[in-house]
Amino acid sequence: MSELIKKQVSEAKALMDKAIEHCDGELQKIRAGKANPSMLDDILVEYYGTPTPLNQVGSVNTPDARTIVVQPWEKSLLGAIEKAIMEANLGVNPQNDGVIIRINVPPLTEERRRDLVKKAKAEVENGKVAIRNIRKDANEKIRKLKSEGVSEDEMKTGEAEIQKLTDAHIAKVDVLSEAKEKDIMTV
């Protein structure tokens, strides 16, 4: 296999690995009845007029499986943090005691679990689409190498390698999906 094709294959592999990391990160954000600090990762708090990630204005901990505790570094932020959590619409109720904010994560109903499985499957499908798009782009780049003197056989070999990578990465996404679905449906 020519160096040009090897380069395209390794670039595609790196991009597919990133797609899997992203998919895994998105699946981690879907709560499965257990308290997880990553549930609050996307929350932005108004901090001196600037939307700032929650984890940059306070510490986020889970003292037990059903509770998240947010301790702001400045007490003046308690109200803003509480408001941001309420507006995030996570289905939780923050309780402000003047020092920390406690969030009790309620157990999931069967209906809510099914909704979360649907959401997880949508994220998994997005991951698979991203991987397939990477395959398409890599194959197009390989075909363009014909003008640089790469033979038809080398191009076919390169496309076969890209397909193997695609299949392997989609299988990894399926494993993530099964694990998350099992996690969500476990009571």
Image (cartoon, rainbow, N blue to C red):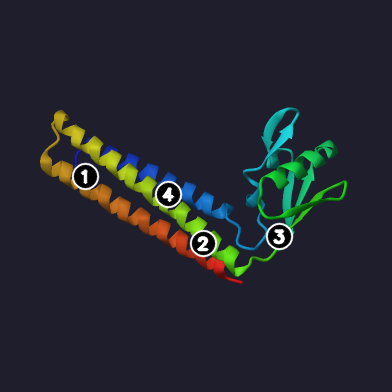
Q: Amino acid at mark 1?
A: Gly
Q: Which residue is mark 1?
A: 158
The image position of residue 5, as x and y in percent, is 23, 39
How far separated are the C-alphas under marks 3 and 4?
Answer: 27 Å
Q: Which residue is mark 3?
A: 105
Q: Secondary structure at mark 2?
A: helix
Q: Nearer the viewer, residue 110 or 134?
A: 110
Q: Secondary structure at mark 4?
A: helix
- Disc nearer the start of the sequence (1/3): 3
Q: How many marks?
A: 4
Mark drawn on residue 126: 4
Crowding at dot 1, Cα within 10 Å, few <14 / some 14-19 / many 20+, comes out as: many
Q: Amino acid at mark 4?
A: Asn
Crowding at dot 3, Cα within 10 Å, few <14 / some 14-19 / many 20+, comes out as: many
The answer to whether mark 2 and mark 1 are in CB contact below 8 A is: no
Q: Which residue is mark 2?
A: 117
Residue for point 72% across, 62% down? 66
- Disc nearer the start of the sequence (1/4): 4
How far separated are the C-alphas under marks 2 and 1?
Answer: 36 Å
Q: Amino acid at mark 2?
A: Val
Residue for point 42% across, 49% down? 126
In the rendered structure, the answer to whether residue 32 lies left or right of residue 152 reads right
The answer to whether mark 2 and mark 4 are in CB contact below 8 A is: no
